Amino acid sequence: MSVAASAEQEIVDFIAAGTTPTAIIHFRPSAEAILRLEDLIDREKEGALSDDEKLELDHCMHLEHLMRMAKAKARLILSGA
């Protein structure tokens, strides 16, 4: 399973289990997902990614963007704004 699929499943499991704005703010991907993403980013800088790995990195970056948006919204909810 690719890190993108694994990270996506982590997010799906997190949401499906029920959550709160505070839990969203504190959500962190697994150590395995972080290490894989760091590897992909490092290898992209070196120009050493396959097409499949580039797609995987793009998907991970999209998931990261979605979580950042969710965390920003959670902070607004908690601030009463």
Image: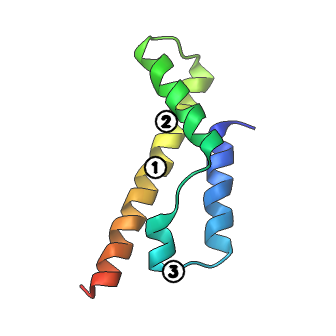
**Image spot of residue 52 (x, y percent):** 62, 24
Is label 3 in a helix, a strand or a loop? loop
Label 3 – label 2 distance at C-alpha:
27 Å
Q: Amino acid at mark 1?
A: Glu
In the rendered view, tell whether residue 47 sits above or below residue 22. Answer: above
**Which residue occupies the extreme left position in the image?**
81
Instruction: Name which residue lies at 45% across and 78% down.
Output: 21
In the rendered view, tell whether residue 3 sits above or below residue 8. Answer: above
Left/right of residue 42 with respect to residue 17 in the rendered view: left
Is label 1 in a helix, a strand or a loop? helix
Q: Which residue is mark 2?
A: 58
Q: Residues within 10 Å of mark 2 (few under 14, many from 20)?
A: some
In the rendered view, tell whether residue 44 sits above or below residue 30. Answer: above
Q: Which mark is residue 3?
A: none
Is label 2 in a helix, a strand or a loop? helix
Q: Which residue is mark 1?
A: 64
**Colour scheme of the picture:** rainbow
Label 1 – label 2 distance at C-alpha:
10 Å
Instruction: Name which residue lies at 38% across and 74% down.
Output: 74
Q: Which mark is residue 20?
A: 3
Given residues 51 and 43, the one toward you in this image is 43
- The reply to whether discs 1 and 2 touch (Cβ–Cβ < 8 Å) is no
User: Of label 1 and label 3, which has the lower sequence position?
Assistant: 3
Instruction: Name which residue lies at 58% across and 34% down.
Output: 35
Instruction: Name which residue lies at 65% across and 38% down.
Output: 3
Left/right of residue 74 with respect to residue 58 in the rendered view: left
**Image spot of residue 56 (x, y percent):** 58, 33
Q: Residues within 10 Å of mark 3 (few under 14, many from 20)?
A: few
**Where on the picture, by quarter, is residue 81?**
bottom left
Quarter of the picture containing the N terminus is: top right
